[in-house]
Amino acid sequence: MKVTLEIQRFNPETDSEPHVKSYNVEVEPTDRVLDALTDIKRNVDGSLAFRRSCAHGVCGSDAMVINDTEALACKTLIQDVAGEDGATIKIEPARHMEVQRDLMVKQDTFFENYKSVKPFFIPDETKPAPVKEYQQTVAERQAFDDPTKCILCGACYSACPVLDKNPNFVGPAAIVQASRFVFDSRESGLESRLDILDQPDGVWACENHFQCTRVCPREIKVTKMINLTKQKIKKLREERGETINDGGASA
């Protein structure tokens, strides 16, 4: 079948504004959008810029906006976004990040937010260190299993409506990464990350639009994990006789 890819192009060295360029390509319905982009790159226009790595939905490199929805190009089949021969597929770079070139975006702020939540294991020093290894029950592991699937593709960050009006929001991906440790029974958990999460631009900025959950290529219940983290913060503050730091939104 033949499809047209309308791709947003932008080269900061030569362009003052982004523009759309169309490419007609021959594809199979079961081909991936990434296959079509690669064909254009190799055989039509070598200047087209986009990221890719594993091409199997594991690295998260090729997150972009396909027909107005965030997705991984390597997991999106042509037949899923082009219903008939001659259809047009619109492709744009991920949102809320500065365009570096064409479909490539600068991810500096995204990863700074990720690092801010301390996405690494911090042992709970109030508990005796294990002689051999930390042990958990199946239920304790399941409490944080979902967030471990995150591949930091940035699709949730791109789709989040809150970032349209509040670019300082730490973002759903960072909170999900924090929740992986917050709910780990072997870890110091929330205490080590409270100063980042319990802020107006932390968990409290989330408005439960569920867009992050809808676009997650790993099917992580992102909004659920954010809300569970909110609940844990509220419980901790109540136990201490303190109030949450949501900037007065709950007043």
Image (cartoon, helix red, strand yellow):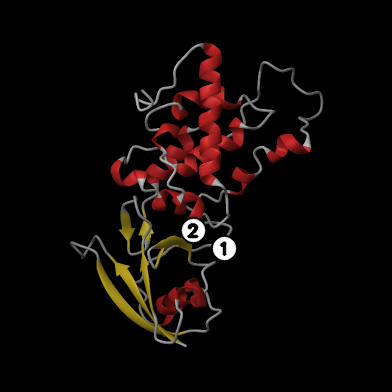
**Residue position marked by numbered label 1 in the rendering:** 54
Q: Residue at x 28, y 75 (%)?
A: 21
Report the front residue among 241 and 92: 241
- Residue 251 in the image: x percent, y percent? 36, 22
Q: Are marks 1 and 2 in contact (CB under 8 Å)?
A: yes
Q: Which mark is residue 34?
A: none
Observer able to see residue 154: no
Residue 221 versus residue 38 in the image, above or below: above
Q: Residue at x 52, y 54 (%)?
A: 216
- The answer to which image quadrant residue 88 occupies is bottom left
- Secondary structure category for the residue under label 2: loop
**Residue position marked by numbered label 2 in the rendering:** 61
Q: Residue at x 39, y 86 (%)?
A: 86
Residue 174 versus residue 55 in the image, above or below: above
Q: Residue furthest front?
A: 251
- Residue 2 in the image: x percent, y percent? 43, 87
Amino acid type at mark 1? Cys
Q: Residue at x 56, y 14 (%)?
A: 239
- Residue 218 in the image: x percent, y percent? 58, 55
Residue 98 versus residue 101 in the image, above or below: above
Q: Residues within 10 Å of mark 2 (few under 14, many from 20)?
A: many
Report the front residue among 2 and 251: 251
- Secondary structure category for the residue under label 1: loop
- Mark 1 vs 2, N-terminal side: 1
Amino acid type at mark 2? Ser
Report the front residue among 60 and 141: 141
Observer able to see residue 151: yes
